[in-house]
Amino acid sequence: MSLLEVRNLTMQFGGLTAVNRFCLDLGENSIVGLIGPNGAGKTTVFNCLTGMYTPTDGDIYVNGQKVNTLKPSQITQLGLARTFQNIRLFRDLTVFDNIRIAFHYQIRYGLLNTIFRFGGFAREEDNIKVRTDELLEIFSLYDYRNELARNLPYGEQRRLEIARALAANPKVLLLDEPAAGMNPYETQALTELIKWVKEEFALTVFLIEHDMRLVMGLCERILVLDYGITIAEGTPREVQDNPAVIEAYLGEEALSC
């Protein structure tokens, strides 16, 4: 079953075609990478998939439902969540509240329950607190739970953003350059974390990344964009050995990755 299907996605800004007839089919429990030079259209693809942009042409399906004109919150409810290249936490909220807020759309109590604090309100709030603490434990962030998000070290901020995305209970997790700004030790730890998250949460992961060691060591399949056009798709080895990819992006140093 396709969790995320993209047919001929095209995104134009005035006379500029940022993405041209992009296609994708993601099944269950896989890790797929999207690479290419700066300005190739990678983040534009993510913005279209998550409802931040309305595509000029083409179709996007999440769990079989067309989402072209849906709001980001509606797409999240269908099972698609993301992180951002530039970390977008609620910087002046605590670590605990950054995750807790992601459960909001899943609550079932109504306005009266909220005002009068009936039993349903208390039960759901207690459940959210338990699930939030579980995610904090999983991502080794529990000791920071009462710290403001802006005070966390960079690597912990990245982990917090992934944990918050998982609180939305996605089936597909989109990671936009998760290793950006990390040192080699942090990148290796992140690689292992993504592998573990994929298995533990039974997720499909679709990621953009410039760190080729992470991409080649993590992804089962890779797509390559150049000027908005898909120039290659295949296994890491097939992409690594593709002359068009080497010329457009990887360079000869890719052969040593």
Image (cartoon, helix red, strand yellow):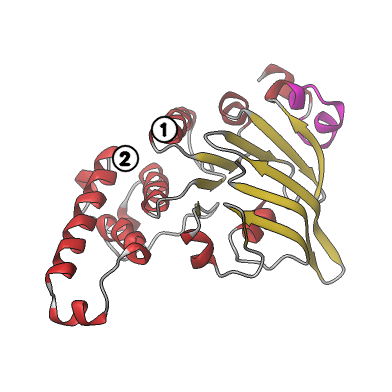
CB atoms of marks 1 and 2 within 8 Å? yes
Residue 28 located left or right of residue 238: left
Judging by the rendered image, the residue that carries numbered circle 2 is 139
| Residue 10 image position (x, y, % from top left) | 79, 59
Closer to the camera in the image, 37 or 119: 119
Closer to the camera in the image, 97 or 9: 9
Question: Can residue 179 be seen?
Answer: no
Residue at the (42%, 52%) spot, across then down: 165
Q: In this rendering, is residue 248 above or below 173? A: above
Magenta-drawn stretch, dominant element (helix, strand or loop): helix
Disc number for residue 193: 1
Local packing at callout 2 (Cα closer than 10 Å; few below 14, some 14-19, many 20+) is some
Q: In this rendering, is residue 115 above or below 257? A: below
Disc number for residue 237: none
Closer to the camera in the image, 252 or 80: 80
**Sequence-wise, which precedes: disc 1 or disc 2?**
2
Q: CA distance from mark 1 to mark 2?
A: 9 Å
Q: In this rendering, is residue 150 above or below 178? A: below
Residue 175 colored magenta? no
Q: Secondary structure at mark 2?
A: loop
Residue 243 colored magenta? yes
Span colored in magenta: 238-250
